[in-house]
C-alpha cells in the first residue's frame, strides 16, 4: 500500500511539475505576443533615434499600443530597407507611411497618425514659382530613395519628363540643394525646417521653400499582410490611438515636440 501511495504521490508531483512547465511556456509565449516589432527611420521631428521618445510619430504609435497593453520595439534603417524588411515579414510593420494602391495590397493601414504637407525647398537666390507639375520640368529635382511623392511626380518621372536625381537620404538632398547640385527638393515642410539644424549655418541660410503644397496627405502605421494576426493588431492600435487622442495626449506630445528640449518619460 505504501508503494502504491508513494507511486501516486510521485505521479502527482510529476503531473504538477509538467503543468507548471506548460504554464511557464504559455506565459512566455503570451509575453512575446505582446511585443510588436516595427521598422523606423530618420525623419525628424517625427522619427529619429536621436530624439526623445524616438520622435513625435514614434511616441504616438508607442502610446497607442501601450493603451492596449502592447509593447513596441523599433529598429532604425534607411527608408528603402525599412520598407522591405516590413514587407518581407522580417519585421511586423513600419512607421509612418502614406497610402497608395500598391502599398495597400501589401499592408494593413492604421488610422492617420500624423498629417503631412510636402513643399519644394529651393535656394534663396532661385526665382521659383509653380502652379502645376509642368512648371517644374526645367529644374533638377532631388528625390530620396524609397519615398512616394504623389501620383503627379511619379507619373512625370516614369514618362521621363522630369530631371531627377535620387539620393539615399533627405539630409543629402538638402546639402546638394544648398550647394547648387539640384534646384528643387520636395520634403515635408516640418521635417525640412527641422533638418536645417543639421546643416551648417551657411548651408541653412541659403535655403527656403515655396508655400504651395505639392501634396497634403496622412501618414500611417503599416503592418504586413503576411501575418493573419495583424488584422486584429491594427484594430487594437486604432482603438488605442483614439483613446490617447481623446484624452489630449497627442496634443501634449505635439506641444512638447515643439519645445527645444523635453523630458524623457
Image: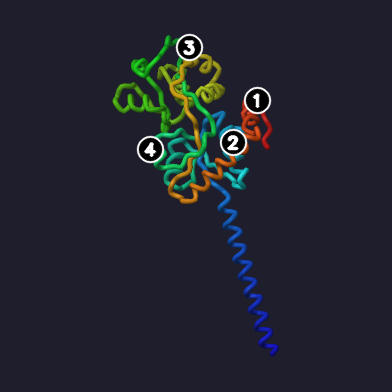
For marks 1 and 3 on the same chain, the one whose residue lies earlier in the sequence: 3
In the picture shown, does residue 40 fall above or below 137? below
Furthest residue in direction right, as rendered: 2
Q: Quadrant of residue 100?
A: top left
SS of the residue at dot 1? loop
Task: Determine the CA span between mark 4 and mark 1.
Answer: 37 Å
Q: Mark 4 and mark 3: span between their CA atoms?
A: 37 Å
| Quadrant of the drawing holding the C terminus | top right
**Which residue position holds label 4?**
102
Label 3 belongs to which residue? 124
Residue 22 sits in quarter:
bottom right
* 76 left or right of 135 in image: right
Q: Position of residue 193 (x, y in %)?
A: 54, 21
- Give the residue displayed 68% in from the left and 84% down from the top: 6
Which of the marked residues, 1 or 2, is nearer the chain's N terminus? 2
Question: Mark 2 to mark 3: distance in Å?
Answer: 35 Å
Mark 2 or mark 4: name the one nearer the start of the chain.
2
For the residues bearing labels 2 and 3, Cβ distance under 8 angstroms: no
Q: Which residue is mark 2?
A: 60
The N terminus: image quadrant? bottom right
Residue 180 circle label: none
**N-terminal label among 2 and 3:** 2
Foreground residue among 196 and 23: 23
Q: Is residue 238 left or right of residue 176?
A: right
Q: Which residue is mark 1?
A: 259
Amino acid at each position: 500500500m505504501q508503494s502504491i501511495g508513494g507511486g501516486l504521490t510521485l505521479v502527482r508531483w510529476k503531473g504538477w511539475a509538467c503543468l507548471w512547465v506548460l504554464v511557464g511556456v504559455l506565459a512566455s509565449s503570451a509575453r512575446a505576443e505582446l511585443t510588436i516589432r516595427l521598422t523606423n527611420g530618420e525623419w525628424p521631428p517625427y522619427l529619429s533615434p536621436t530624439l526623445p521618445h524616438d520622435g513625435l510619430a514614434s511616441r504616438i504609435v508607442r502610446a497607442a499600443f501601450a493603451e492596449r497593453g502592447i509593447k513596441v520595439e523599433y529598429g532604425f534603417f534607411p527608408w528603402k530597407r525599412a520598407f522591405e524588411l516590413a514587407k518581407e515579414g522580417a519585421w511586423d510593420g513600419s512607421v509612418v507611411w502614406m497610402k497608395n494602391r500598391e502599398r495597400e495590397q501589401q499592408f494593413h493601414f492604421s488610422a492617420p497618425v500624423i498629417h503631412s504637407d510636402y513643399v519644394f525647398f529651393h535656394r534663396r537666390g532661385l526665382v521659383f514659382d509653380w502652379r502645376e507639375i509642368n512648371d517644374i520640368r526645367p529644374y533638377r529635382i532631388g528625390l530620396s530613395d524609397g519615398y512616394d511623392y504623389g501620383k503627379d511626380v511619379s507619373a512625370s518621372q516614369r514618362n521621363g519628363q522630369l530631371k531627377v536625381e535620387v539620393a539615399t537620404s533627405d539630409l543629402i538632398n538638402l546639402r546638394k540643394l544648398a550647394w547648387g547640385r539640384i534646384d528643387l527638393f520636395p520634403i515635408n515642410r516640418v521635417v525640412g525646417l527641422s533638418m536645417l539644424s543639421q546643416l551648417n549655418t551657411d548651408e541653412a541660410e541659403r535655403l527656403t521653400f515655396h508655400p504651395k503644397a505639392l501634396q497634403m496627405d496622412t501618414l500611417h502605421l503599416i503592418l504586413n499582410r503576411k501575418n493573419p494576426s495583424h488584422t486584429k493588431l491594427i484594430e487594437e492600435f486604432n482603438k488605442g490611438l483614439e483613446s490617447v487622442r481623446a484624452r489630449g495626449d497627442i496634443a501634449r506630445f505635439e506641444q512638447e515636440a515643439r519645445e527645444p528640449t523635453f523630458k524623457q518619460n
